[in-house]
Image (cartoon, helix red, strand yellow):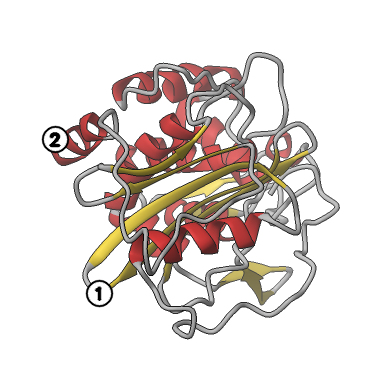
Amino acid sequence: MRVGAVLIASVLGLTVGIGEDAFPVPAIYAKAAIVVDSANGTILYEKHADNKRPVASTQKLLTALVVSQAGELDKKIKVESTDTRVEPSKVGIRTGREYPRLLLLQSLLVKSGNDVARCLARDHSGGQDAFRPALNAKARQLGMGDSRFVNAHGLTEEGQESTARDMAKLAVVAHCDEHIRDAVQRESLEFPKKGRMDMLRNTNQILPLSFVTGMKTGFTNAAGRCLVSSGEFNGRDVIAVVLGSNEKHVWQDSESLLRWALKVPADIGAPPEEEESEDAAADAS
């Protein structure tokens, strides 16, 4: 956490332009965005980074961080019926069944199940409302002064908001967590369903790019398309936060910002296949 605190402090620094000749700053559609160097927190780019807005399921990074830092990830969690009473994006955990906490954490970040978020929140704090103080205490610890969280999954709820800058602070620390970092870079995850192993596909459509190392998608009608993404190239590691985009531009915005910040040539990294995301019609991912 001391390393994370140093990086967060650096996120408050000045914007620094890089590679303005061969790599011009991209024009993006998103309503708010920021790019930071995850090694030292230096801000490389920002657009309306302090505007408060809903961030949808990208806030599951905070839920995951609270759960991961609580430990006992090999412990099995028994699902209660109240955990499953949420729509629309679900992994499909079954009432009465037990799952390892680590597997639930991984599925939360790969498939973005709102049912899994509720299960982890209830297991951590005893209930959904009881988990709220844990989320906000962690946010304050990370210096996310413009953020307030009401639930564990990111579905639209009054009073729940953050900023691109605050989400970057969260992402820098989450990026340092070995369990989160492992989960967000997985393109798929085996998960037991109805007596067989199902393959959960990652909702992050730019993950197949060779320089992209993961993080988290989000969508609600209020938030628009959101993506916190990380990338690495030639020894450099950066994080991009894109908020308030749309289905067409969220992937383009994020890829363009990562390529620019990392100075990745256009011919490096095969583009992801054009396809509709599984949760395109859902209210959160």
User: Would residue 71 be seen by someone viewing this image from the given angle?
Assistant: no
Task: Kindly indicate the quadrant of the structure image that contains residue 168.
Answer: top left
Give the percent coordinates (x, y) of residue 135: 45, 25
The earlier-in-sequence mark between 2 and 1 is 2
Q: Secondary structure at mark 2?
A: helix
User: Would residue 255 be seen by someone viewing this image from the given angle?
Assistant: yes
Give the percent coordinates (x, y) of residue 103: 48, 59
Q: Residue at x 86, y 52 (%)?
A: 281
The numbered disc on residue 23 is none
Q: Residue at x 73, y 38 (%)?
A: 81
Q: Which residue is mark 2?
A: 2
Mark 1: few/some/many CA within 10 Å (<14, 14-19, 20+): few
Q: Secondary structure at mark 1?
A: loop
Q: Residue at x 34, y 65 (%)?
A: 262
Pointers 2 and 1 in contact (C-beta within 8 Å): no
Observer-nearest residue: 187 or 9?
Answer: 9
Left or right relative to 77: residue 151: right
* Amino acid at the residue labelled 1: Asn
| Number of marks drawn | 2
Left or right relative to 7: residue 78: right
Q: Which residue is mark 1?
A: 234
Question: Closer to the observer: label 2 or label 1?
Answer: 1
Marks 2/1: CA distance? 26 Å
Residue 277 against residue 53 in the figure, above or below: below
Residue 196 against residue 63 in the figure, above or below: below
* Amino acid at the residue labelled 2: Arg
